[in-house]
Amino acid sequence: MDFVAGCIGGAAGVLVGHPFDTVKVRLQVQNVNKPMYRGTIHCFQSIIRQESLFGLYKGIGSPMMGLTFINAIVFGVQGNAMRRLGKDTPANQFLAGAAAGTIQCVICCPMELAKTRMQMQGTGEKKSSRKMYKNSVDCLVRIYRREGLLGINRGMVTTLLRETPAFGFYFLAYDVMTRRMGCEPEDRFMIPKLLFAGGMAGIASWLSTYPVDVIKSRLQADGVGGVHQYSGIADCVRQSVRKEGYMVFTRGLTSTLLRAFPVNAATFATVTLVLMYARGDCEAEDRPQPASHCAQAQTPGQTQTSGL
């Protein structure tokens, strides 16, 4: 049931947050010498005006396809890691989250590569005259034919550098906030508290690794149109700082933070409601559970966690 709830919650998060992600990517990779967008609001307005509302949802197929595997990996690994670590402590929450973030990169990296390429396709065009990729699957197939496994795993190192600590801080922040707020199943304000804790945990997670995300987006967008600008991570960092200064690492941050709160609030609220509806109460079965979870309860070898 955790698997199904995680998938539904993740889908809700993607639907809420994908437009913000499209804006983030466009701002991160736009040409600094000839910028198309002046900021987050202008980027939103320009995409809707030039490409219609559907322009904000370009590339959504890729994260939707990867949701099943990513949520299964994240919740499964985090829950099993917490059980093996034994004690439900903030440090263990971080370690379990970091382990989950590391392993899910196998799916996350190709998924985000396709998403980024699709988001950049037809920039500024309402109806693209020539589409390089039909959809996310076609995008990955074409990249694989040209560049092999290395091609579809472009940006894997930066993805690992981002996801490993980000998921650690995510579960840590969520656990600390739910404990401090005293969230329990019988609390009539549980859902508002859940929404707030999930949203703030998402913001904390992004702030912890955002500069790495900028580099990852640039490396994954590099090569669109056949022109490669960067030879690697160090070269991308060097060129970006030289041309745009250190503020380059905050490009698209406003859009990202605006997206982080509703996405994570929607994800955790949906997961919680699905689990509570399915189980009828917050008593967990004798199986591994994600510790930072409203439906979390005592598992073998663990003491009772926070209500979430």
Image: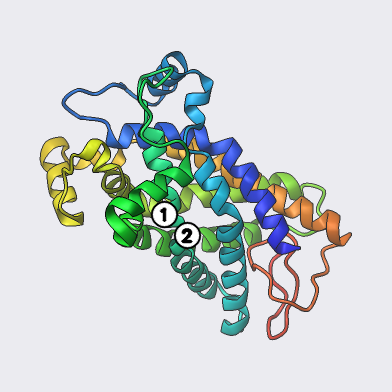
Q: Is residue 58 left or right of residue 129?
A: right
Position in image of residue 139 (x %, y %): 41, 44
Q: Is residue 277 left or right of residue 96?
A: right
Kind of residue sitting beneath label 1: Pro
Q: Residue furthest right?
A: 280
Q: Is residue 102 left or right of residue 196?
A: left
Residue 275 appearing in the image = yes
Residue shown at 71% from the left, 48% from the top: 270
Q: Is residue 128 left or right of residue 175?
A: left
Position in image of residue 203 (x %, y %): 48, 47
Residue 110's mark?
1
Residue 35's mark?
none
Look at mark 2 in the image and give the residue it sits on: 107
Quarter residue 300 falls in: bottom right
Residue shown at 42% from the left, 60% from the top: 163
The residue lying toward the viewer, choosing from 258 and 286, is: 286
Kind of residue sitting beneath label 2: Ile
Q: Secondary structure at mark 2?
A: helix
Residue 194 appearing in the image = no
Q: Residues within 10 Å of mark 1 (few under 14, many from 20)?
A: many
The residue lying toward the viewer, choosing from 244 and 216, is: 216
In the displayed structure, 129 sits above or below 305; it is above
Confirm or deny contact between disc 2 and disc 1 (CB under 8 A). yes
Quarter residue 129 falls in: top left
Quarter residue 159 falls in: bottom left
